[in-house]
């Protein structure tokens, strides 16, 4: 079992009821797993301050589009800044909440956020740091996810390795506009 913390994004009661009903009826749903920094928000070297939050161009439109297509949306992110002592879990949770709020203002929804707070040089080895698929497997325990119809979008090779280890497709985002990237790669 993972030592990773997770936080559920704010959801309205109807969305929670829908997720509970789908899970209870074993109606598995396709899921997009997103890396966070460099994929949904600008990676400014261990971002954790709310004032430093800046969405990647097209991020909200991308998440909203996948939600509208019936996908669950999950963020899985390595956050070694915690192990390095640069910020703590409360800072991370406040940043994640601000990220979810910024996305929701544009009609997008994040269903679950999972993070690994470790780094082998600072906190020792762990089972949850990407490229390990442990965060994906943890999400499957929390939500009614159909891995056979799911994929991951990230900006680092470790994201793609994580996807491969979980048996799902991985898409390496190196561009400027996430929505255009997803269109060009036929993900919608």
Image (cartoon, rainbow, N blue to C red):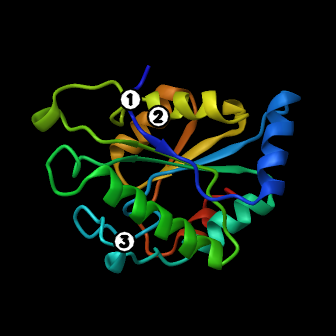
SS at mark 2? helix
For the residues marked 3 and 2, what is the alpha-carbon distance in whole angstroms? 22 Å
SS at mark 3? loop
Quadrant of the rendered structure where residue 180 is? bottom right
Residue carrying label 3: 42
Q: Which of 37 and 51 is in front in this view?
A: 51
Q: Position of residue 145 (x, y in %)?
A: 70, 35
For the residues marked 2 and 1, what is the alpha-carbon distance in whole angstroms? 8 Å
Residue carrying label 2: 135
Residue at the image point whose x is 16% and y is 27% from the top: 124
Dot 2 and dot 1 residues touching (CB under 8 Å): yes
Mark 2 vs mark 1: in front? 2
Residue at the image point whose x is 54% and y is 27% from the top: 137
Q: Position of residue 138 (x, y in %)?
A: 53, 30
Q: Position of residue 174 (x, y in %)?
A: 40, 63
Residue closest to the far top: 1
- Is any atom of residue 183 visible in this view? no
Residue closest to the far left: 121
**In the picture shown, does residue 95 fall above or below 51?**
above
Quadrant of the rendered structure where residue 102 is? bottom right
Left or right: 99 in relation to 16: left
Residue carrying label 1: 132
Quadrant of the rendered structure where residue 123 is? top left
**In the picture shown, does residue 96 fall above or below 118?**
below
Residue at the image point whose x is 69% and y is 58% from the top: 11
Q: Where is residue 7 in the image (x, y as percent from the top left)?
A: 51, 47
SS at mark 1? loop
């Amino acid at each position: 079992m993972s030592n990773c913390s997770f936080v559920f994004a704010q959801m309205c009661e109807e969305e929670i009821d829908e997720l509970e009903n789908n899970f209870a009826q074993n109606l598995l749903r396709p899921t997009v797993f997103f890396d966070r920094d460099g994929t949904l928000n600008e990676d400014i070297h261990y971002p954790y301050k709310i004032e430093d939050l800046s969405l990647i161009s097209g991020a909200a439109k991308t998440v909203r589009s996948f939600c509208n297509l019936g996908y669950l949306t999950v963020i899985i992110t390595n956050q070694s800044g915690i192990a390095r002592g640069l910020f703590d879990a409360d800072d991370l949770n406040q940043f994640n909440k601000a990220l979810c709020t910024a996305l929701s203002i544009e009609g997008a929804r994040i269903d679950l956020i999972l993070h690994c707070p470790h780094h082998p040089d600072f906190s020792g080895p762990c089972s949850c740091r990407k490229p390990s698929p442990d965060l994906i497997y943890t999400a499957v325990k929390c939500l009614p996810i159909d891995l056979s119809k799911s994929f991951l979008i990230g900006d680092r090779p470790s994201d793609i390795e994580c996807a491969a280890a979980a048996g799902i497709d991985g898409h390496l985002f190196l561009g400027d506009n996430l929505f255009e990237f997803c269109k060009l790669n036929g993900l919608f």
